[in-house]
Amino acid sequence: MKSDKKGQIRFVDLFSGIGGFRVAIDKLGGKSLGYSEIDIFAKETYNTNFGDPDEHDLGDVRKIEKLPEIDLITGGVPCQSWSVAGKRLGFKDPRGQLWFDTIRTVKISKPKVFIFENVKGLADPRNLSNLNLIKSEFNKLGYTVFSKVLNTFDFGQPQNRSRIFIVGFRNDLKSHTQNFEYPEGKENGRELIEFLDGIRKKNIVKNKFSIHALFEGKVPLSRNASQKIDEFNDFFVLCDTRNGHTTIHSWDIRDTTRHEKEICMAILRNRRKKKFGKKDGNPLSLKDIQGLVNNVTKKNIDGLVAKKILKFNKEKKIDLVHSKNSSGVDEIYRVYLPNSRIFSTLTATGTKDYIATEYVEGKTLEEYRNNFIEKILRKKNLRQVTPKEASRIQGFPDDFKIHKIDRHANKQIGNSVSPIVVEEVVKKIIDTGVFDN
């Protein structure tokens, strides 16, 4: 690999944000000839770190008519139109139409290679026609195009962040494409504590359990790569609509009787059944609940309403106050322990996810859960990650200067591409020899 020669790769960075692509490509011997970004606060952070001359500011991508001679063009195309968190309007969303401006810039500059990043929603089967359209337009410009979803977690960072990376090689350099392959992830052995400030590291020896002890013999399909099938989770989920071995419900942390807990669990387990309605979660009548649990009275329900666990809807049916998965409980959704090897996807708008500032252990599941409730929740030994910690989790080097105003810093980091993933993709492109001449 010939990536140590400074200035080997001449590139332009579209939708540059704060420079996630730039950090990685500079490290591999890149030479930036321009960037395009319209968010003034993101540009402040970009210029603080890179200090580019004014003529490198290409302005709004929609107005670009000329580009310098370059080897590589990159960009994190705005993704809200394909995101599961958005309305999935695709090309009907003005932000989705920015793909056509992206394609136009490739037509103008004819780079040897391009790399564009987007949310994994673009790779969803429901968006396959849109992804194929994008690829087809690049094909018409004379490019061989590849795409693959990569997760930041697989590249040494404790973050569950899956993104599609679209790579194109100009056809006159097609001989290099046979050598191209996406990087393979590596096992993540780094704990969250390595990215956090002010928390003392503690070595935890985790107990091993049988599948029956943890999951009653059936492992849930929803478990991700960071979750072991023979260990307790390193995080807890506060949620009233789902159940798991480290799920904490509002009735677990409110002062409730065994009978009240039984009522709540019956609602949780039955509200999705078709006989109670067509929705994913249906309110139940008092009669419905009385058919599920013995000796239930309206007074029981009123008591749980007073404790802000249950509520009545307009039809006087009964539902959970926290009736959506991600709503959490008391504005907290997930709490990650310092020894966790994963954290949630960082977003521009923030999350209800926290880190515990103390470790939790337990020989039994009941002890583990109770210790978490008493030590972390009741004593409020938890906090959200700081912008600087988020920057590290995203994969920026420690000397990267984040925006001085926290709300701007959090938005910018959540919007950014993970530099560590870009670096590995670019290394694979360099390995093809496409930049040698």
Image (cartoon, rainbow, N blue to C red):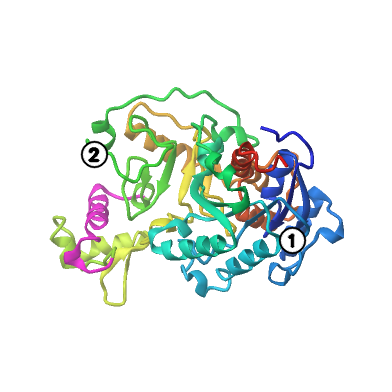
Badge 1 crowding class, 10 Å Cα cut-off, few under 14, some 14 to 19, many 20 or more, is some
Q: Which mark is residue 218?
A: 2
Which amino acid is tagged 2? Answer: Lys
State the residue position of label 1.
Answer: 41
Q: Is residue 41 left or right of residue 168?
A: right
Residue 134 on the magenta segment: no
The reply to whether the magenta stretch includes residue 258 is yes
Q: Position of residue 45 (x, y in %)?
A: 76, 54
Please indicate, yes or no, whether residue 378 appears anywhere in the rendered image: no
- Compared to 388, does 170 lie above or below? below
* Amino acid type shown at disc 1: Phe
Magenta-colored span:
255-279
What residue sits 46% from the left and 65% below the top? 130
SS at mark 1? helix
Tell me the tag on residue 5: none
Name the residue nearer the viewer: 376 or 234.
Answer: 234
* Quadrant of the drawing holding the C terminus: top right
